[in-house]
């Protein structure tokens, strides 16, 4: 049969808490180390242990890393979901199953490899607990041998994770070897799927978005980090705490040049950020949808009193508790317009782990330049899965602390008024508590204030202030990351997306081209919209906004931005909690296009 | 040194050369006779006497009548009027950013004992250094006459309804949570309040002062246990003090050990004396028992209830020391390029920790 090389998706069905995470990452890494573009999607339950969990490893010679709805290879390790898992596999697919697990007989056109895992584990260890953990390495060995993943790479990947624990290393390695040996001796290959060494991953790293964001924050000079644990945000601050502890000690005194405070809830977490920001520190917190809801009041306070702070929202499925371990992009309009009254916030929309790193730092510069809370919207898919990336670059520029008047600057001015727009960009100057010059003293409040920060209920003073805040946000258009635009000459279709949808968009765009639909593509990377976004919408007769929420949130923002083109903006929506796949995008766009064709006739 | 206003000749100055006027704020907009104004006066006096440097003080508050008062004292100190019940989190953030600031937090019974109860508890647990003053009038002054969580059992509102819920004793709660400085006073008792404030300024952790401050407009009627008349009748100070009128700024200075007769707005006369000279404020169990007994007798125990300067400090927990985080330059907070290179190598090789999640 004709081999299918470096182009398949492996779907592993196990039980969470069983150590399959390690096994799956070994496979992922081994393929990556062979220079083959690869991605991993962890579909884990909202539970500590015992519930079903799935992991998808996609190898793609073309570099496509988005999730695929269909898989070529299934690994059956969970009896509870086995029937449902095999039912999802089509003709020509492969099932590698733990022999002990029963499922209905399958048609001949599926290749089934049964492996006596318990028997293979016997000589390796008699400890029942250890067996349960290490048995997953059997399927690593089986797949490696079947697919042709080099044993040396598997060992290297295993060593990278377990090298510091020689006993664990030995056990796991023995299990891998047992799986490989069993295939060689008992399971002749009857399927076409294989890997072959490439050189597409040279120099790259494999990292998750939350860790990337944490690194970006540290190198941007964050000093106050607050948080309350919530899936899928916790790993960002946990990673950050680890990095800070290692790399941010004063060499002379050994004291910390940072503070990480676990707050009692998200209201306290954001309050601490604003207090620290007011006092002149780079402060941030990270949360998910439910935490953002709690932070609404303080966000509005930060907007109106004009205090810098960075708030990450690693989006998950809502509403309410929702699906805590599933991904979504459904907090967009909420975050952008957070709080009561007329408020509006800059929102950064990273689409890759590299942008998580980069935007972490950009968010601080922006927050301090604009003197307001700035939100960074990531999601579970980007934040918690491992992605390939070029290594991150050391920041070249110094930081931007914004318009702060210290004692030296204060000495040069005759008068200081906290909310006076002296430069015309809507952004006043601020002073910090602790500075000696009494000229700089002022009172911060969430109630109505005039240019001198005095309490006032005067109608005109209120209007002047609100208009200036609007001017500030207009200034932000040119400061947030500009969109990434790829124009196809003569294209009638323009695709718009943001965040982690990017990877499915790249693949879908190629599929659409093959189907005769040549589309331009714009990826929004920040709100408020850069001028080029409206231009893109006006340039294309049919605009399709692809997003991972039910209510077409980005599309609604676009329609408000370009009202005369509102009827030309249509939606492709994906909101089942699974990461976006190219087929959904392609199918959705083609359906719109044929409807448009039909309407045109 | 701060840029002091030129002091008219003859005005007394404190140890840093400032007159009392330098510690004043804007004119109050609170009701005439409000207890909070007296507390404001006490803060001004105490700050001046203690020689606080205004630029090193930050005033914080929540929302409510008492929370307006930071505008009325220490006009040369930065102020932060936050949102209802959430000033403790602001205080914690301010302190983390700049540990050199002396924080004075003003709150009310609604701001602290209702919406703010959670943040109050966690502030105390963390022992963040804040002089935390609750100006306690037992009703929501700004929202016109509803009961507060500190309202005593049986006390009545202006409309005649009686409170049936157990009151929250902020002092007992603070002691229970390990607070190292807990005091109660009365807005009209400046002689007691001022030394308590000065001691609180010097305390290295959270200092809670629950100051009963009768509301003229909504509480001063028969049946309210926090009216002037009620407090006068039930007040049981732990240490003998003279009673000083609180509806005027405190300008009088008198010898300790003397008695002072004052006339209340309702015409009655009050004289107080020092009691319980041998009260031991380092015994937490005694403090709690004293508070419980007083509540059962419907008295207000005032004075320094509990003190412990050895409680674990927030800064030690955070391993903070030396310069404030807010002022650190870029080179002290941006690790060198080699650090990033090494981290990138670990994510290239896979020796870095695996991404989080299930499995």
Image: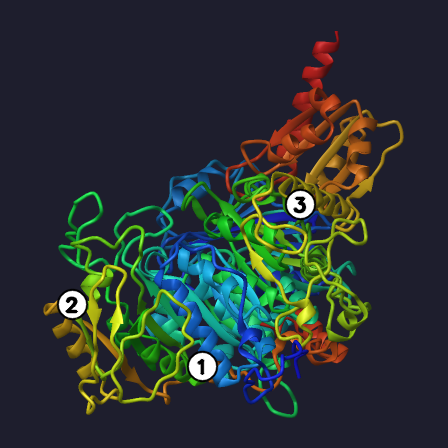
**Residue at point 45% right, 57% down?**
A267
Q: Residues within 10 Å of mark 1 (few under 14, many from 20)?
A: many
Disc 2 to disc 3, C-alpha distance: 50 Å
User: Taking B114 as reference, is B44 left or right?
Assistant: right
**How far separated are the C-alphas under marks 3 and 1?**
36 Å
Q: Earlier in the sequence, mark 2 or mark 1?
A: 1
Q: Disc 2 marks which residue? A: B233
Horizontal arrangement in the rendering, residue A23 relative to residue A15 (left or right): right
User: Extreme top residue here?
Assistant: A601
Query: Quick one: SS at disc 2?
Result: helix
Position of residue B217 measured from the top left corner of the image (x, y, whole percent) = 31, 51
Q: Quadrant of the C terminus of chain A?
A: top right
Give the image location of residue B200, x and y in percent.
40, 81
**Residue at image location 46% in from the left, 77% down from the top:** B45
| Residue A380 appears in the figure | no
* Badge 2 and badge 1 both on one subunit: yes
Label 2 in the same subunit as label 3:
no
Residue A465: numbered disc: 3
The secondary element bearing badge 3 is classed as helix
Foreground tag (2 vs 3): 2
Image point (61%, 73%), residue name: B352
According to the image, label 1 marks what residue?
Answer: B201
Instruction: Kindly identify which chain the residue marked by label 3 belongs to.
Output: A
Residue ID at (41%, 40%): A84
Q: Residue furthest left?
A: B297
Question: Dot 2, how many residues are within 10 Å of its Cα: few (below 14), some (14-19), or many (20+)?
Answer: some
Q: Label 2 lies in what chain?
A: B
- Which x, y percent locates residue A378? 60, 51
Q: In this rendering, is residue B96 above or below A451?
A: below
| In the image, residue A67 above or below residue A186 | above
Compared across the picture, whether A406 is left or right of A28 comes to right
Question: Residue A63 placed where, x, y %?
Answer: 73, 50
């Amino acid at each position: 049969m004709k081999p299918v090389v470096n182009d398949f998706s492996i779907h592993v069905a196990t039980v969470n808490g069983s150590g399959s995470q390690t096994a799956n990452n070994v496979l992922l890494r081994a393929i990556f180390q062979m220079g083959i573009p690869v991605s991993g999607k962890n579909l884990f339950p909202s539970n500590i242990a015992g519930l079903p969990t799935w992991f998808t490893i996609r190898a793609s010679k073309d570099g496509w890393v988005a999730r695929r709805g269909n898989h070529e290879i299934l690994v059956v390790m969970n009896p509870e979901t086995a029937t449902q898992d095999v039912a999802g596999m089509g003709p020509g697919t492969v099932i590698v199953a733990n022999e002990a697990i029963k499922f209905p007989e399958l048609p001949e056109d599926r290749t089934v490899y049964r492996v006596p895992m318990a028997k293979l584990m016997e000589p390796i260890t008699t400890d029942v607990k250890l067996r349960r953990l290490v048995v997953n390495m059997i399927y690593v060995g089986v797949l490696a041998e079947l697919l042709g993943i080099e044993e040396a790479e598997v060992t290297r990947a295993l060593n990278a994770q377990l090298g510091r624990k020689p006993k664990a290393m030995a056990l796991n390695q023995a299990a891998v070897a047992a799986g490989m040996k069993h295939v060689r001796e008992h399971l002749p290959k009857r399927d076409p799927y294989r890997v072959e060494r490439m050189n597409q991953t040279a120099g790259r790293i494999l990292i998750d978005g939350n860790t990337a964001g944490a690194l970006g924050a540290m190198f941007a000079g964050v000093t106050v980090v607050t948080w309350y644990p919530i899936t899928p945000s916790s790993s960002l601050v946990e990673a950050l705490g680890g990095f800070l502890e290692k790399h941010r000690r004063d060499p002379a005194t050994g004291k910390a040049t940072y503070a990480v405070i676990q707050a009692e809830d998200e209201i306290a977490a954001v309050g601490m950020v604003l207090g620290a920001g007011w006092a002149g520190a780079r402060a941030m917190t990270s949360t998910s949808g439910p935490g953002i809801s709690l932070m609404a009041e303080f966000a509005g306070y930060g907007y109106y009193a004009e205090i810098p702070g960075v708030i990450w929202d690693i989006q998950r499925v809502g509403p309410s508790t929702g699906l805590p371990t599933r991904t979504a992009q459904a907090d967009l309009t909420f975050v952008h317009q957070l709080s009561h009254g007329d408020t509006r916030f800059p929102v950064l929309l990273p689409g890759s782990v590299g942008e998580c790193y980069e935007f972490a730092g950009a968010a601080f510069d922006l927050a301090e330049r604009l003197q307001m809370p700035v939100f960074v919207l990531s999601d579970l898919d980007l934040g918690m899965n491992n992605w390939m990336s070029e290594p991150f670059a050391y920041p070249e520029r110094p930081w931007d602390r914004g318009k702060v008047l210290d004692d030296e600057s204060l000495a040069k001015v005759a008068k200081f008024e906290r909310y006076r727009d002296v430069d015309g960009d809507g952004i006043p100057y601020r002073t910090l508590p602790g500075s000696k010059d009494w000229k700089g003293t002022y009172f911060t409040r969430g109630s109505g204030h005039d240019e001198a920060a005095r309490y006032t209920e005067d109608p005109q003073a209120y209007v002047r202030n609100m208009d200036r805040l609007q001017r500030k946000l207009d200034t932000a258009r040119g400061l947030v990351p500009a969109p990434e635009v790829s124009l196809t000459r003569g294209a009638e279709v323009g695709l718009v997306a943001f965040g982690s949808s990017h990877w499915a968009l790249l693949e879908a765009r190629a599929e659409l081209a093959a189907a005769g639909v040549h589309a331009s593509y714009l990826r929004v990377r920040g709100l408020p919209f850069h001028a080029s976004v409206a231009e893109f919408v006006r340039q294309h007769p049919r605009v399709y906004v692809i997003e991972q929420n039910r209510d077409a949130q980005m599309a609604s923002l676009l329609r408000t931005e370009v009202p005369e083109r509102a009827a030309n903006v249509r939606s492709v929506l994906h909101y089942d909690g699974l990461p976006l796949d190219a087929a959904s995008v392609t199918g959705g766009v083609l359906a719109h296009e044929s409807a448009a064709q039909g309407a045109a006739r | 040194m701060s840029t002091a206003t030129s002091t008219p000749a003859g005005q007394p100055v404190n140890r840093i050369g400032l007159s009392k006027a330098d510690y004043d704020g804007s004119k109050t907009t609170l009701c005439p006779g409000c207890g909070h104004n007296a507390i404001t006066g006490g803060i001004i006096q105490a700050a001046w006497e203690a020689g606080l440097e205004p630029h090193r003080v930050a005033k914080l508050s929540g929302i409510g009548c008492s929370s307006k008062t930071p505008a009325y004292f220490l006009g040369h100190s930065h102020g932060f009027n936050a949102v209802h019940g959430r000033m403790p989190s602001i205080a914690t953030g301010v302190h983390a950013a700049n540990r050199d600031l002396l924080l004075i937090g003003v709150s009310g019974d609604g701001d602290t004992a209702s919406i703010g109860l959670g943040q109050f508890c966690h502030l105390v647990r963390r022992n963040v250094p804040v002089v935390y003053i609750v100006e306690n009038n037992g009703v929501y002054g700004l929202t016109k006459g509803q009961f507060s969580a500190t309202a005593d059992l049986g006390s009545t509102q202006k409309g005649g309804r009686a409170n049936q819920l157990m009151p929250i004793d902020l002092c007992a709660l603070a002691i229970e949570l390990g607070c190292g400085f807990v005091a109660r006073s009365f807005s009209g008792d400046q002689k007691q309040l001022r030394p308590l404030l000065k001691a609180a300024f010097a305390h290295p952790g959270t200092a809670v002062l629950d100051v009963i401050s009768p509301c003229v407009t909504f509480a001063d009627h028969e049946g309210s246990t926090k009216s002037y008349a009620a407090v006068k009748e039930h007040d049981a100070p732990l240490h003998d003090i003279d009673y000083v009128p609180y509806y005027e700024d405190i300008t009088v200075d008198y010898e300790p050990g003397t008695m002072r007769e004052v006339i209340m707005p309702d015409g009655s006369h009050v004289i107080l004396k020092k009691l319980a000279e041998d009260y031991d404020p380092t015994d937490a169990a005694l403090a709690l028992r004293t508070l419980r007994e007083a509540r059962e007798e419907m008295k207000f125990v005032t004075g320094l209830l509990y003190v412990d300067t050895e409680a674990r400090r927030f800064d030690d927990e955070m391993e903070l020391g030396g310069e404030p985080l807010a002022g650190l330059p870029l080179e002290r907070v941006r690790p060198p390029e080699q650090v990033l290179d090494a981290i990138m190598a670990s994510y290239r090789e896979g020796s870095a920790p695996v991404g989080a999640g299930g499995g």
